[in-house]
Image (cartoon, rainbow, N blue to C red):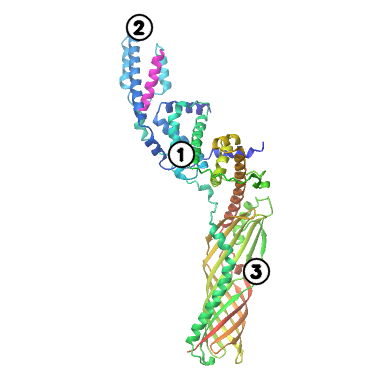
Amino acid sequence: MSDQWQDDLRDRMELHEEAVPEGLWESIELLMPDGNKHRAWSKRMIALAVSAAAIILLFIVLYTTNENQAPIEFVEKNVSIDPGPIPMTADEAHARAGSMPDKNSAVKRATDQASTSRITGEEKLAFNNVSKPPASVSRKDETAVTVTGTKEAGAKQETTKKEEINRVVTNKQHENDLGQLFASSSRGRDRENAKWQTSLSTSNMPSSPARTRSGYGTFVVQEAVGEQYVFLSSDIRQEVNTTVQHFQPVSFGLTLSYNLNEKWSLASGLTYSLLSSRLHSGSGNYHYDDNQRLHYLGIPLNVAYNFWQNNKFAGYISSGMLVEKNIAGSLSSNYYIDNRLESTAKESISSKQLQWSVNSAIGIEYRVSDFMGIYAEPGVAYYFKNSSEIETFYKENPFNFNLRVGLRFSIND
Amino acid sequence: MDKRKKDEQELLQQLVQGNRLAMREFYDGNSRYLTAVCSRYVSNEEDVKDILQESFLKIFKAIDAFEYRGAGSLRAWATRIVVNEALNQIKENDRLQLTTLPSWDLPDQEEDQEPDFEDIPASAIMEMIQSLPTGYRTVFNLHVFEKKTHKEIASMLGISENTSASQFHRAKAQLVKEIELYRLKAKHYERSMAR
């Protein structure tokens, strides 16, 4: 029969227990017919009466057959002293009744009931000693691995692309607003006089090629999880692959630069970078997708040297360093069974370590007006290894090329 | 086994006599198991409590009518009472919610796929069963755990034999998926534990 799995399941669940709802016994006890007690009581009375009668009968029988006083005393003792809390099992009662010369069934029944009633009598006393049912054991104990998620996050993931596009658009908008702001604050003096400059920039590095490795995976560096492979290799059903793709970081910056002299300038400010990655892990129709988004704020410090300029263009080289700190991050996981989204989980992640990098770029600037210029800076950057366990674009591509474009505003003294 | 039989019979005797201490003993020995049985049918905790309360009262009240048939028969009898109470509750609330999709809607390839619970912890199996729609769950429970035929289930629930069979197949297919999902999550979890 192909129903073996049903038998197996039944056998397994036969041993399964769940925590009893709180206060169940109390509410059962409350609803137990009160008559129960009365009945128990009256039963006891009847039992006592019957046993008394039986003992009297015994007494007469023994007295008349034996003429000896001793056994009578013994029996009497049994009657008068026994109500004490000495438990007497039915078996004992049987045995005692059996040892009596008279095996009268009425006597036997009576003794039997008497013993029962004695147990009933102890009930109240002993009841308080009955231990409470075992404290409820969480039934989640074994299911910690069950990650439940909200469908909501799944929908969010779909709009990620759109959001990114919107962000670029709104940032552009933002730049313009800032442009207006700076424009109105500047007095239109000659650029040559400008000591302070601010700039807005954006850069987009090329995305790294998708890397594929075998087995299930997450956004955690490989070395840290080596021991997990034993567990993972248990899946022999199908070849399992993990593909990780780190998308190009998108970053925006606001820079303030100070002209030391005609040739040299120092720049610092604030940068924001978004690092997003996608991980696909599983086999065929059974897989999970992780989407990781990390937000960084950074402070750059750069030195630039102006090697050439005419009245519209300027060429310069710049180099410096950038320190970035992860300020927020999220990891959303979607689980697919038969290629259909079955569940979604979202968690926030973060990396405490600072991300240091050095960069160098060659820049060209076109001056739109006296107070505003557009620049483009192709450059290289090297991201130092930090001890974070989260895999990022930086970790995957420590050395990379980037192109930074932006607007630079001159603020005059 | 003999000892168990003797203990059971002794307990039974005391139960029949209305011994409240014996009732408590019976409760302590069986309530956790019966809670598990009940929770398979009904997942709402309040409902579980109500059903168990009614069941225990019935068990104690009807204990005279119980006929001892060997070790374990008392628990089996109590289980039947709990199942009946759960079914009554489901029917009362009209929550069977049978999914009345035509049977040709059933995915073919899943017909022969059987859920493999081997590596799934019992508490997770429990949650999977609880996550089934009421109709699937009820039929699945009756068929697998109470060993009822679809014909018997049909008459118990007032549905057709075909409906019972199709609910069962759907339940099975969903459980196959739930197991896949569980394993996938387990792997993901194991991996991210290293973080």
Q: Does label 3 lie on the same chain as label 2?
A: yes
Does residue A114 belong to the magenta stretch? yes
Q: Can residue A119 be seen in this view?
A: yes
The amino acid marked with disc number 1 is Ile
Q: Distance between the residues labelled 1 and 3?
A: 59 Å
Tell me whether circle 1 and circle 2 mark residues in contact (CB < 8 Å): no
Q: Which chain does tag 1 point to?
A: B
Q: Residue A371, relative to residue B76: is it above or below?
A: below
* Span colored in magenta: A104-120
- On the image, numbered disc 1 is attached to which residue? B51
* Secondary structure of residue under mark 2: helix
Q: Which amino acid does label 3 sit on?
A: Ser
Can residue A191 be found in the magenta stretch? Answer: no
Q: Tell me the amino acid under the disc marked 2.
A: Thr
Cα–Cα gap, marks 1 and 2: 60 Å
**Mark sitting on residue B12:** none
Q: Which chain carries label 3?
A: A
Looking at the picture, how far across and down is residue B193, in whole percent? 56, 56
Residue assigned mark 3: A208
